[in-house]
Amino acid sequence: MYEAKFQNFDDPAGSAATAPRLAALRAELRRRGLDGFLVPHADRHQSEYLPACEERLAWLTGFTGSAGIALILGDGAVLFTDGRYTLQAREQTDQDLFSIEHMVEKPLSEWLEANLPAGAKLGYDPWLHTAENAEKLGKACASAGAILVAVEPNPIDAIWKDRPDPPLGAVTLHDTRYAGEEASSKLMRIREELHRLRADVLVISDPPALAWAFNIRGKDVPHVPVALGFAMVPREGRPALYLDGRKLTNETRHALEQTAEVREPSAFTADLGAHAAGKNRVRLDQATAADALVRIVTQSGGLPLRGSDCVAGMKAVKNSVEIAGAKAAHLRDGAALTKFLAWFDREAPSGKLTEIDAVQALESFRRESGLLKDLSFSTIAGSGPNGAVVHYRVTRKTNRPIAPGDLFLIDSGGQYQDGTTDVTRTVIVGEPTREMRDRFTRVLKGHIAIARAIFPDGTTGAQLDTLARRDLWAAGLDFDHGTGHGVGSYLSVHEGPVRISKLGTAALQSGMILSNEPGYYKSSAYGIRIENLVLVVEAPVVEGAERKLHAFETLTLAPIDRRLIELQLLTREEIAWIDGYHGNMRAALTPLVDPPTKTWLDRATASLAGA
């Protein structure tokens, strides 16, 4: 009945090929006089999502998560990943060949200090690590009496015989009716920031920043509409944009040449060296600029200025056109998700649905609008124990029937030209247990605490993160991921610099869009997450306030499963928030859904106050 266009359910290559590949890599390292090598999940832009040709970590280990790094030594190997992927890492890798470490609890640098043999030469590809990371690793090696060695070309590329070709997705122009600002205006703002920073040139190394600054979009990476490339914006003179010419039509090239020189990527490193010569000050984004760029600038006689990407802060604050687009995108996305939830509620109790059935159905409902360009990430759809795998991706091998008594977690989003969505709902099939209701309600209380927060100008995500965890902590529970991340405007669903997490140091500003997604995961049993996107807005004026205040406006429109709510755990204010959210949603979505869905929606959003 339904089909998926923007995602597949192929099983990862798995760990069967790992042993011969590991042996081939070790032979290549010996040939180069190296005792070990680091294999991160990264490309030249330190991207989260990679084209197939850059998936070195997955090719070598079988692990397909978006955060990880492998340490390969002559007599052992270690895979480091974070709390989102520890279960997945154990399932996908051969643990006879790799030990698994939690990169937060046992960072790679600490492991190297404690375990790297004295005199060892540890290789790394300077294009796949930031300068800050390379320096940290270099110090750790030195503490162990070893040395970190920059290696080019990457030794994996020498043994990866069937490596896919680089992507050649077409570059398109992002119209100002969606962008809200001309590229020439954005470039002027960037130059003004360079004057303030006393920098001579900015290197744009982050593909979403490149897309935003020049009002372009691309198809080089799954689910993120970006073109892989670089740009240099001098304080004086024309910018240069480095894109493979095969991605450009004559019309697109002509439009881009109105504001920038369009050059081939092969010219980038030489041009960077020329810009750096004569002690010029080159601004580099410390989050995405490769260590190789710092080395080129330094070797050319320039001064690398490492810091936050001045584009990231501009991009994170959406203008009025982008905000209107985000609201329109969430309205149509909410209608699609509500149709899906009504369908799921009818079909799931039969026990005949699988996780893949649900993923295919939801994508089909989204495509009905005719405006869906892609998904914003591969849908996470976990029933029962699969829901406890935070970034679970269903495959034909793992596909699980959705059975009565299961909690079903579905985390999904769409890419529309006017906005990017990301929403998670957890629903029950049949009757929940008392424990499920307790855990769900504690997660919901954390979600509401974030949604209702009022906070002064300058507040960071780290200061808000505790609100989402308070009621879980009270029961001795927690979740091992951030509470929220920034979201782009028809760009990456994970956008910096702002985030709500223990590590969120950037201040929240009006116009920023973030996720609000606390959760709870019981290993081998079930997972719970409730996620809405929220817009930072100015809070209503408080009499006597001495500081400007901000608040959140919820953008996502989708019912929260009332059957999982333990009313006795909620305050009157929390019940009022849920009823208000459901009431506003019902009014907005009713005109957009069919009669059967309307009937279901009325029931699903009935007032809790009268329950």
Image: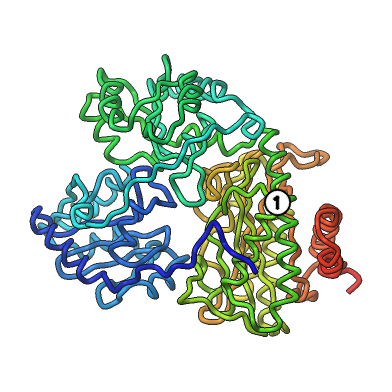
The residue at the point 21 percent across, 65 percent down is 21
Circle 1 residue = 369
> Label 1's element?
loop
Residue positioned most to the front:
1
Residue 202 showing in the rendered view: no
- Of 188 and 376, nearer the camera is 376
Label 1: few (<14), some or many (≥20) within 10 Å? Answer: few
Q: Relative to 502, say whether 17 is above or below.
A: below
Residue positioned most to the right:
610
Q: Is residue 5 left or right of residue 329?
A: left
The residue at the point 60 percent across, 66 percent down is 360
Q: Quadrant of the N terminus?
A: bottom right
Image coords of residue 213 (percent x, y): 51, 30
Q: Is residue 76 left or right of residue 45?
A: left
Image coords of residue 563 (percent x, y): 77, 76
Q: Is residue 233 left or right of residue 355?
A: left
- Of 284 and 478, nearer the camera is 284
Amino acid at circle 1: Ser
The residue at the point 29 percent across, 24 percent down is 271
Image-quadrant location for residue 543 = top right
Image coords of residue 377 (percent x, y): 53, 56
- Of 119 and 473, nearer the camera is 119
Colour scheme of the rendered structure:
rainbow
Image coords of residue 330 (percent x, y): 70, 50
Residue 318 showing in the rendered view: yes
